[in-house]
Image (cartoon, helix red, strand yellow):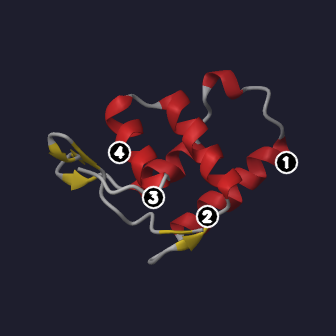
Amino acid sequence: MQLNFNVQLVSFDGPLVEAGKPITLKQMAILALSVAIPDEQGVGGDEKFKRYQLADRISQSTEAVEVTAEEIAKIKMLLGKGWGAMIVGPSYMLLEGCSVP
């Protein structure tokens, strides 16, 4: 599936910003794949390397990126563990191919 991660997250209140800068799906996906989430402490090096490779692929993108259903599920799972509804909601919508409000 081709997915454009260079899209600003939009919630029901409008575009999401932090310190005056737009928050993008790209930023949130890279963060989710990169940070140490407390209940992920048992994750081994091979899985961390796969996450790094996916984050790198997303970070290099200027257009749509080819991602598998498994990779999308991984990003969704990590976002769900680490962030609140205002990030998870619009991120999930984009990851599932839905338009945001």
Is the Cβ of the residue at disc 1 closer than 8 Å to that at disc 3? no
Disc 3 vs disc 2: which is toward the camera?
3
Q: Report the Cα–Cα distance between label 4 and label 1.
A: 29 Å
Q: Vertical placement of 77 versus 50: above or below? A: above
Is the Cβ of the residue at disc 1 closer than 8 Å to that at disc 2? no
Q: Report the Cα–Cα distance between label 4 and label 3.
A: 11 Å
Q: What residue lies at 45% left-to-right and 45% top-to-bottom?
A: 92
Q: Report the Cα–Cα distance between label 1 and label 3.
A: 29 Å
Q: Report the Cα–Cα distance between label 2 and label 4.
A: 22 Å
Q: What residue lies at 63% left-to-right and 22% top-to-bottom?
A: 38
Is the Cβ of the residue at disc 4 closer than 8 Å to that at disc 1? no
Mark positioned earlier in the residue sequence (1 or 3): 1
Residue 90's disc is 4
Indicate the position of residue 18 as horizontal and vertical percent values: 24, 45
Three-letter code, disc 2: Asp
Mark positioned earlier in the residue sequence (4 or 1): 1
Mark positioned earlier in the residue sequence (2 or 4): 2
Q: Vertical placement of 43 versus 1: above or below? A: above
Residue 56's disc is 2
Mark positioned earlier in the residue sequence (1 or 2): 1
Mark positioned earlier in the residue sequence (3 or 2): 2
Q: What residue lies at 20% left-to-right and 46% top-to-bottom?
A: 19
Residue 97's disc is 3
For disc 1, the marked residue is 46
